[in-house]
Image (cartoon, rainbow, N blue to C red):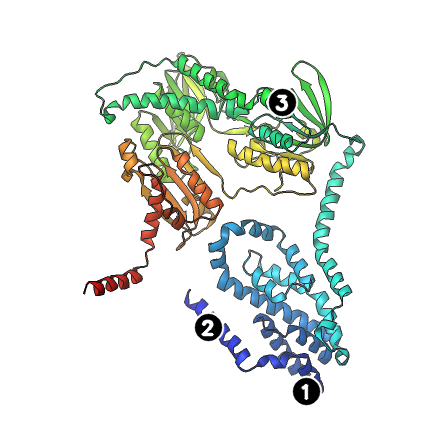
Amino acid sequence: MNKKKLGLVIFLLALVASYFIFDLGRFFSLDFLKSQQAAIEAYRVANPWTTAGIFFAVYVAVTALSFPGAAVLTLAAGAIFGLLTGLIIVSFASSIGATLAFLASRFLLRDWVQNRFGDRLKALNAGVKKDGAFYLFTLRLVPAFPFFVINLVMGLTPIRATTFYWVSQIGMLAGTIVYVNAGTQLGQIDSLAGILSPGLIGSFVLLGIFPLIAKRIVAAVQAKKVYAQWADKKPATFDRNLVVIGGGSAGLVSAYIAAAVKSKVTLIERHKLGGDCLNTGCVPSKALIRSAKFLSHVERAREFGIDSAEAKMDFAKVMERVQSVVKAIEPHDSVERYTGLGVDVVEGSAKITSPWTVEVSHNDGRVETLSTRAIIIATGARPFVPPIPGIEDMDYLTSDNLWDLREQPRRLLVLGGGPIGSELTQAFARLGSQVTQVEMLPRIMSREDEDVSQEVMARFIAEGIDVRVGTKAKQFVIEDGEKVLIAEHEGKDVRIPFDAVLVAVGRAANLKGFGLEEMGIPTGKTVETNALLQTIYPNIYAAGDVAGPFQFTHTAAHQAWYAAVNALFDPFKTFKADYSVIPWATFVEPEVARVGLNEADARAEGIAYEVTKFGIDDLDRAIADSEAHGFVKVLTVPGKDRILGVTIVGEHAGDLIAEYVLAMKHGIGLNKILGTIHIYPTMAEANKYVAGEWKRAHAPQKLLEWVGRFHAWRRA
C-alpha cells in the first residue's frame, strides 16, 4: 500500500473511531431531532445561509463516510427547510457524498479486488461497462438495497465517476422526495419504519425494474421493426425448431446439441460434412506435417546415436496417406452418424428467404422450403486470395486445392507468414521442396511475441528455408517461360523464381449466396452478431469462422454451443458467448501454443504484467529426447501468481498448454501448479518449473533471513 492510500486509511479510521468514541450517533436519531427541532428552527431563522451550509457539509460527510443517520438527516431537511429547499440540499449533498464514498472505495480497493478476482469479475465488468447506468439506476430506486453498500461496491467496478454521480442524482430523487416530504410532518412520525409502507416499497421496486423492462421493450420494438416487412410470411406452424446452414465444426456441434435436447433440426451442407477442418484444413495438414516430421528425424539420425539412416520419399504416396487419414476420421462427421443422432441431414445449398424460411436446393435437383423457428448460419470461410496483378495466371495453390497435388513442386513459393503459411512452409521443405516464404510484415507469425517469431524463424533458416520478411508481393509474371514473383524489399524490387505458389495469407468468411444481403443482415468481414450471437433478426444466429472473431475449429465448436442453446431456448434462457480463455497452437517445429495475453497484447492494452520464463533446454525429458529447445513464458499480475497469459514454444506445446487453459478458466494460480505432482520425466514438468521460477522470484527475503537466524540458533 502506498503512502497516499495508507494516509487516507488512517484518516478514515480516525473519523470512524471518533464517531463511536464520542457517541456521535446520538445526534442522528429521530428522538434527538424531534427534541431539538424548535432550537434548530430558531437558529435557521437567524442564520439561514449558515444553517444550510452546515447542514449540507454534515450530510456530505455522513454519506461519504457511510455513517448511519442519512435517513434522519433527510427528514431533518424537510423539517428545517421545507420540501423544495430541503429536496435541493439533500439531492446534491447525498449525490456528492455518495460519489466521495465511491471514489474512496475505488482508490483504496479496486486494484486489489480486480487483481485478485479479475477472472471471476470479467462478466460483471463487461456488463457494468455496457449497462452500468441501468444497473445503478435500478439499485438506487429500490430502498431494500443499502445505499452505502451500493456506493462502495460500484467503486470496485469500471463505471465512470461522472456516470455514477448523475445516475445517483436522478435515481435517489424519488426516495429523497418521500423522506423530505415526511420530514415536513415530523411531529407525526414515530419511527423510520413507518415512512415506507409496503405499497410504497412496491412502487419503488417497480420503478427500479422499469429500466430493465424498458430495455426489453426497446429490444422488442426493434425486433418488431426488423420483422415488420416479413410479417405476412411468418408461418402459423414450423417444420423445424432449428435449421443449421453449414456442416463444418460450428454446424455439426449446433446440430448435435439440438438433436440431443430432442428438438427437430435440419443440417444443410452442399459439399462435405466436416467442413474445412476435416477435408482441407486441420486434419490433412497435420497428417502432412507428421510425414514431414518423420523425414526430419531421419535427417537427424546422428543426434540419436545412429550413424546413418535413409528414407525414400514418394510424394504421391505421402499425399495418398493424407487422404487416407481424412477417410479414417470422416465417419466421425458422416451423414450416417448424424442421422443416427437424430439430425435431418440435407445435402444441398441453402438460402434464407425470410426470418423463418430456408430454401433448400438439393444436390439431386429438388427444391423445397423449410419453415423453422430459428436459423444458425455456420457457413465457414475460404482461403483469401489477394488481388496481386498476374496471380490468376499462376495456377495458384491454396489450402483448398493443395491436397490434390501428386507431383511435388521443386521450387515452392509460399505467400504468408501466419500459422497456415508457416506450417506448410516447413512441411514442404522437409519433404524436399526448395521453399521461399514471403511475408510483408517484419517477421513471420506476427501475432506472437518477437522472441517466439525469432525461435521459429531460426529453425526455418537452419532447415534451409529462404525466409523473406518485410517483402511485399507486387506482381506475378512469366519471364522466359519461368514463373517469377516481383516483390518489394527495402524499397527495391526483387525477383523470386518458382514452380508453384501457395497462397496462405488468411481466410475470408463465406457470406455470398445464402440470402444475407437480401435479408439485410449486416456483414463486414464476418456476419455481425451481438453477445448472444444473434444477427439483427433475434431468431437468426451465426457461429464459427463466418462470425469470428477467432477462426479456429475449437472456437467454432465453442460458439456453436451458445448459438444452439440460445436459438432453442430464447427468450426463456440465454447465454452470452464467453471468449475469456481462448487457446490456440501453430504446429510448426518448434511448436507454438498460447492462451490469454502475450507481451505484445498486454502492452497494447496497457495491462501491467510480470514475465516468468523457463527454458525447456534445461528440462530432463527434452534433453533425453534431443528436443532441448524452446521455453514456457507466463505473464502474471505484478506481485501475484494469477495468470494473465501463457506462451509455450517447444515439443508438444499444444498439449502442454492445456494445464494453463484449465488454470486460467478456473482461477488456479502458479502456486497451485507448483504444488501439483507432475510425472518425471515428462515435458509437462516445464509447467511446474516455470511456477518454481516465479516462486523463487517472489520469495519473502526478510522472512528467510529470520528463518536462517532461527536455524543458526538451533545449531548453537
Q: Nearer the viewer, residue 500 or 190?
A: 190
> Could you tell me which secondary element the residue under label 2 belongs to?
helix
Q: Position of residue 537 (x, y in %)?
A: 69, 37
- Cα distance in 3D space between marks 1 and 2: 35 Å
Residue 651, by quadrant, is top left
Of pointers 3 and 1, the one earlier in the residue sequence: 1
How packed mark 2 is, by other alpha carbons closer than 10 Å (few <14, some 14-19, many 20 or more), is few
Q: Extreme left residue here?
A: 716
Q: Nearer the viewer, residue 5 or 458?
A: 5
Residue 32, by quadrant, is bottom right
Q: Measuring 68% from the left and 40% from the top, which residue is drawn there?
A: 570
- On the question of residue 535 being in view, the answer is no
Q: Nearer the viewer, residue 302 or 546?
A: 302
Which residue bears the numbered disc 3?
Answer: 339
Which residue bears the numbered disc 1?
Answer: 43
Q: Amino acid at mark 1?
A: Tyr
**Quadrant in which the N terminus appears:** bottom left
Eye-nearest disc, 1 or 2: 2
Q: Position of residue 114 (x, y in %)?
A: 49, 55
Q: Measuring 22% from the left and 64% from the top, which residue is drawn there?
A: 714
Q: Amino acid at mark 2?
A: Ile
Q: Is residue 546 above or below residue 678?
A: above
> Could you tell me which secondary element the residue under label 3 belongs to?
helix
Q: Position of residue 645 (x, y in %)?
A: 43, 44
Residue 495, by quadrant, is top left
Q: Nearer the viewer, residue 323 or 99?
A: 323
Q: Measuring 36% from the left and 15% from the top, which residue is drawn there?
A: 410
As drawn, the label of residue 10 is 2
How packed mark 1 is, by other alpha carbons closer than 10 Å (few <14, some 14-19, many 20 or more), is few
